[in-house]
Image (cartoon, rainbow, N blue to C red):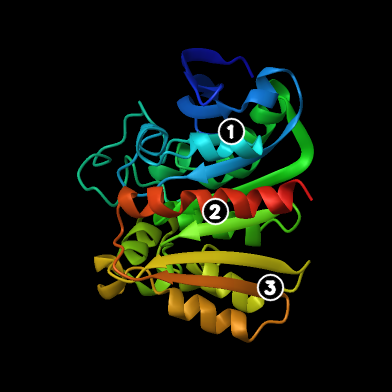
Amino acid sequence: MTLEQLSANKCFEGEQRVYRHRSDTLKCDMTFGVFLPPAALEGKPCPVLFFLSGLTCTHENFIQKSGFQQHAARHNLIVVNPDTSPRGVEIAGQDDAYDFGSGAGFYVDAKEEPWSKHYKMYSYVTQELVDVVNANLPVVPGRRGIFGHSMGGHGALISALKNPGLYQSVSAFAPIANPTECPWGKKAFAGYLGSNPDDWALWDATHLVSQYESTPQELFIDQGAADNFLAGKQLLPENLLAAADGNDHIQTIFKQREGYDHSYFYIATFVAEHIAYHAALLTA
């Protein structure tokens, strides 16, 4: 679990760092961001919040565009944000499209060749990266949240729903909420998981919500009303909300933001609210 620190920048009396490590799960080198708030720099254990990015992103987008650091510093939250797919691997066709392959791991564990050797982003995010963070950063045990955007919102939701108790808080900006029913999800799931719809359902937040019977879980869903991907039926939050309405084990908070689109301008506007939401649950 050796980490190589690539950069460190002072930010709001905390420090924004970037690390690289060798991933046993993905069988490649992976890079991720870590924001350490002032308390963590003083050696005090802090809760940790994971952020999962969307299609085409690397670890850099959220660090540079969202402005989250000032809010994480205020609440003394460590924030960790990984890349969106394996990198530096040789797979034919991995760079041919923006919505499949490089930058589009979809936070699933691929079953289909040639993707199954490296494309196991779900296990990386929910197991290996958690272990790396626990071993190397001053985190409070059992105080862990997760959130994300678009494809990363999908990843955050399924990570929480498939692992009751692993995360104490979860939220999502404009998530791909029902991937088995949208073009992005159908393409990715067919390529990574094969043609069996039963396999797809295991990675779909709407299906997981409909079947969820474990510890009560609250989901904070945020959606821009002017999002072109909402209009294009790529996100389908209404399907997830309908499934949650029929399940007493799931509570939802849904906020629709009039005039806001799918961009980082939207995220930057509301990221303070999300971080405050997580902080309230992680420091209670």
- Vertical relation: 204 (above or below) 284: below
Q: Is residue 256 left or right of residue 203?
A: left
Q: In front: mark 3 or mark 2?
A: 2
Q: Separation of disc 1 and disc 2 at Cα? A: 14 Å
Measured as percent of width and height from the top left, residue 6 is found at: 45, 14
Q: Amino acid at mark 3?
A: Tyr
Label drawn at residue 102: none
Q: Is residue 233 left or right of residue 38?
A: left
The residue under label 2 is 274
Disc nearer the start of the sequence (1/2): 1
Label drawn at residue 73: 1
Q: From where the camera sits, is residue 279 visible?
A: yes
Disc nearer the start of the sequence (3/2): 3
Measured as percent of width and height from the top left, residue 46 is found at: 72, 33
Secondary structure of the residue carrying tag 2 is helix
Q: Quadrant of residue 101?
A: top left
Secondary structure of the residue carrying tag 3 is loop
The residue under label 3 is 212
Which residue shows up at 61% across the image and 37% down it? 74
